């Protein structure tokens, strides 16, 4: 039996919804780089991030990232942090795998 502790599912996240949001929304972000992670986390957590908002007296008319709830609460922040931690662990494991492969099969010139 596989433990659900530390899994994306225990973080209350949906990989399918994240992929859908990235595909649909990432290119609509004003930043060519920030749209990808913002859309992914919005989709994974069932939130709607960015969008039109006011800073001081200035209306910012940005596209929404994600199609879920507009309001995030403390539980959403906890879920986002768990998902971020899981992503960091996966990235570290992938980098360790690449390093192990490079050490096992050194390139000779």
Image (cartoon, rainbow, N blue to C red):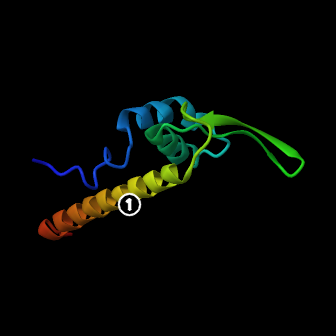
Q: Quadrant of residue 15?
A: top left
Crowd around label 1: few <14 · some 14–19 · many ≥20 (10 Å): some
Q: Which residue is mark 1?
A: 85
Residue 71 placed where, x, y %?
A: 62, 41
Q: Quadrant of residue 91?
A: bottom left
Q: Quadrant of the C terminus?
A: bottom left
Residue 106 placed where, x, y %?
A: 17, 69
Farthest-out residue, left: 1
Q: Nearer the viewer, residue 57 or 104?
A: 57
Q: Nearer the viewer, residue 13 or 94?
A: 13
Q: Is residue 73 above or below residue 81?
A: above
Q: Residue at x 76, y 42 (%)?
A: 53
Q: How many marks?
A: 1
Q: Is residue 36 above or below residue 63?
A: below
Residue 107 appears anywhere in the view: no
Q: Residue at x 17, y 70 (%)?
A: 103
Q: Is residue 94 left or right of residue 12?
A: left
Q: Nearer the viewer, residue 22 or 4?
A: 4
Q: Is residue 21 above or below residue 41?
A: above
Q: Residue at x 34, y 56 (%)?
A: 86
Q: Secondary structure at mark 1?
A: helix
Q: Nearer the viewer, residue 97 or 104?
A: 97
Q: Is residue 83 left or right of residue 62?
A: left
Residue 39 appears anywhere in the view: yes
Residue 67 placed where, x, y %?
A: 55, 30
């Amino acid at each position: 039996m596989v433990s659900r502790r530390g899994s994306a599912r225990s973080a209350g996240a949906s990989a399918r919804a994240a992929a859908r949001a990235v595909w649909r929304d990432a290119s609509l972000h004003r930043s060519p780089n920030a749209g990808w992670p913002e859309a992914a986390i919005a989709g994974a957590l069932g939130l709607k991030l960015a969008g039109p908002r006011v800073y001081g007296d200035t209306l910012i008319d940005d596209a929404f990232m994600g199609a879920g709830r507009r309001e995030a609460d403390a539980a959403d922040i906890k879920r986002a942090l768990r998902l971020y931690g899981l992503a960091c662990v996966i990235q570290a494991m992938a980098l360790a795998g690449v390093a192990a492969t490079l050490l096992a099969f050194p390139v000779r010139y």
